[in-house]
Amino acid sequence: MSDLTEQRLGYGFGLLGGLLIALGGLISLAVGAADFVLGRPTVAMGAMGAAVVLFVIGALAIFFAWLGRRTWSDRPLASGVLLVVLAFVSWVAMGVGADLLALVGTLFVVLSGVLYLIEPAKKAAHAVVSAA
């Protein structure tokens, strides 16, 4: 990316989103543990299963944001697409209103992916204008 501000902001949003999703997983794990103690094992297993899914999605969001910042800094298109797809999968997996903190984290992950996609979109638009 030629503009490091977009790259840094994308990394920051990806990191924040991944951490919020993982924090939502931690809260879901605590709720599941409380349900298990209160004698509701089926509800507890559902909450703990959701916590595992949120931990994995949060870790992947942080990983892809890191790849976009460090390893794949010359390929922001791949990082941006992966982050947007991961946010969509996260939203589908959680549903609407399941865990507000994780949904806010998903919003930050989508913003991170969009920020990584700005530079490739500029290059594509420039190539189209130059060819015309």
Image (cartoon, rainbow, N blue to C red):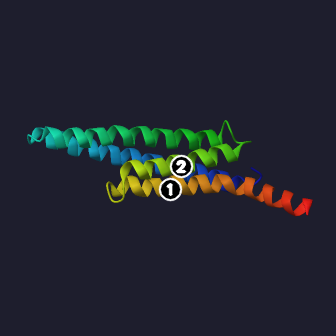
In the depicted structure, whether residue 84 falls above or below residue 39: below
**What residue do we see at 44% from left, 42% from top?**
57
Asked if marks 2 and 1 touch (Cβ < 8 Å), the reply is yes
Q: Which mark is residue 60?
A: none
Percent position (x, y) of residue 3?
74, 55
**Residue behind mark 2:** 14
Task: Kindly give the residue lying farthest to the right in the view shown.
Answer: 131
Packing grade of label 2 (10 A; few <14, some 14-19, many >=20) is many
Q: Secondary structure at mark 1?
A: helix
Indicate the amino acid at tag 2: Gly
**Residue behind mark 1:** 108
Q: Secondary structure at mark 2?
A: helix
Question: In the visual, does 76 lie left or right of 130?
Answer: left
Task: Kindly give the residue lying farthest to the left in the view shown.
Answer: 39
* Real-space CA distance between mark 2 and mark 1, rounded to the nearest whole angstrom: 6 Å
Percent position (x, y) of residue 97?
33, 59
Question: In the visual, does 11 lie left or right of 128?
Answer: left
**What residue do we see at 42% from left, 58% from top?**
104
In the depicted structure, whether residue 46 falls above or below residue 131: above
Residue 71 in sight: yes
**What residue do we see at 25% from left, 43% from top?**
47
Question: In the visual, does 44 lie left or right of 117?
Answer: left
**What residue do we see at 69% from left, 47% from top?**
77
Q: How many marks?
A: 2
**Label 2 vs 1, first from the N-terminus:** 2
